Amino acid sequence: MTDVRPTSEAESESVLHTLFGSELGGHEQVVLCQDRETGLKAVIALHSTALGPALGGTRFHPYASEEEAVRDALNLARGMSYKNALAGLEHGGGKAVIIGDPDAIKTEQLLLAYGRFVASLGGRYVTACDVGTYVRDMDVVARECRWTTGRSPENGGAGDSSVLTAFGVFQGMRAAARTQWGEPTLRGRRVGVAGVGKVGRYLVQHLVEDGAEVVVTDVKQAAVEAIIEKFPQVTAVSDSDVLVRSPLDVYAPCALGGALDDATVAALTATVVCGAANNQLAHPGVEKDLADRGILYAPDYVVNAGGVIQVAEELKGFDFDRAKAKAAKIYDTTLAIFERAAADGIPPAAAADRLAEQRMAEARGSRTAGVPRQVRQ
Ligand SMILES: NC(=O)c1ccc[n+]([C@@H]2O[C@H](COP(=O)([O-])OP(=O)(O)OC[C@H]3O[C@@H](n4cnc5c(N)ncnc54)[C@H](O)[C@@H]3O)[C@@H](O)[C@H]2O)c1
């Protein structure tokens, strides 16, 4: 077998080394796509199809370099393998990135060209929306590619996924409440929600209905005003720094990634963190700092899986109640992660990774043993 260890520093940093020779690699397939007529440059990364066709969105972003784009595709695809595994989906992990400023270069022709590339993979990769792509874009991609989800209801899709994402986050929060305080309810708890956009506002509704005292913040004043108008009992603070320092039982980051940095963790009054934002841990080690301070962290990719559950269900012909029942299982999964973390003496984020890896390994094992996988698509 070829030794893939790097022979120089430059090589150790190369994206090919990441792919073939590092723990962050191991991807099954990476496809570089180019269509000069429309300006399309895209990377499709399939991390794993152990559990089924790789599923993950298409990010449209003006990357500083092609290398950065490939790295992002590799990282995001790997993350989707873990997310899909713990969401109980029969899907592996994949992700695509389109390089460029969507406001400047996104055209119907470019999206159609992209759809033809995804179609050329014959169903090994199923695409959906991500940062920079929207339901209306997936409607266009779907004209060339049947392996497209996250479309509009007028085109046979399920539309906005934030309803089920918020519902899933709420289920994860109930599991955290049960673990921390013995009862799966937020009744009487003070919950701070940072970011009341598409997901945050539905989360606030669940919390109010459950009897929680809710405090919100958002950089957009209009978003805060809309919440207060609908729920006059909700209060607001000026920014997320003020929010984390105010007396809270639960902190719910529902805006951007990196919300949990060293300063925030040190300042937090809440003993539960559970929110929708992706990539909340600013750097490796934050999960341990949270655990050391007795703060129970519900891993972001576990509790925010309602959206991917929705797009996976869309592929089968969308039924909201069926999808909601599946998203409700986020409660059990989050509880199982907390139990595993306590049993193994590790932070919940590490326990989540172990459970996901176990599920993927079992799927690979049954494949090798000749157990046929269910036929999909
Ligand atoms: N929409 C989904 O189905 C879904 C699924 C999984 C994960 N997520 C993640 O959840 C998060 C929220 O998604 P969304 O769809 O609600 O996005 P959104 O853009 O609709 O809402 C985000 C809100 O956060 C606010 N915000 C931005 N920076 C802020 C800051 N520093 N402090 C306070 N508020 C701030 C914005 O003004 C906006 O109102 C994102 O990280 C997203 O990746 C969303």
Image (spheres, helix red, strand yellow):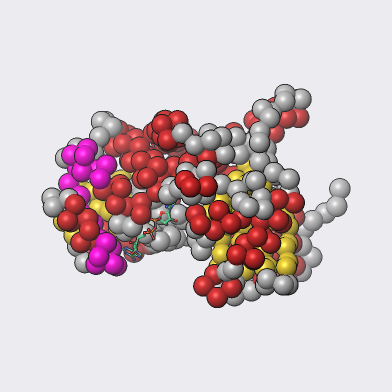
Q: Residue at x 62, y 62 (%)?
A: 111
Query: Could you tell me residue 21's position as x and y percent?
Result: 73, 55
- Is 208 covered by the magenta stretch? yes
Name of the residue lying farthest toward the left: 233
Q: Nearer the viewer, residue 376 or 89?
A: 376
Quadrant of the image occupied by residue 210:
top left
Magenta stretch: give its range. Answer: 205-223
Quadrant of the image occupied by residue 32:
bottom right
Name of the residue lying farthest toward the right: 1
Q: Residue at x 20, y 61 (%)?
A: 225
Q: Nearer the viewer, residue 322 or 358?
A: 322
Q: Residue at x 22, y 55 (%)?
A: 227
Query: Could you tell me residue 59's position as x and y percent?
Result: 56, 60
Query: Could you tell me residue 205's position as x and y percent?
Result: 25, 45
Q: Regarding ligand 1, which quadrant of the image does it lie in?
A: bottom left
Query: Could you tell me residue 196's position as x and y percent?
Result: 30, 57
Judged left or right of residue 25, residue 240 is left
Judged left or right of residue 77, residue 277 is left
Judged left or right of residue 261, residue 241 is left
In this rendering, does residue 22 appear at all?
no
Q: Nearer the viewer, residue 87 or 124?
A: 124
Above or below residue 134? Residue 209 is: above
In this rendering, does residue 316 appear at all?
yes
Judged left or right of residue 216, residue 91 is right
Q: Residue at x 51, y 63 (%)?
A: 132
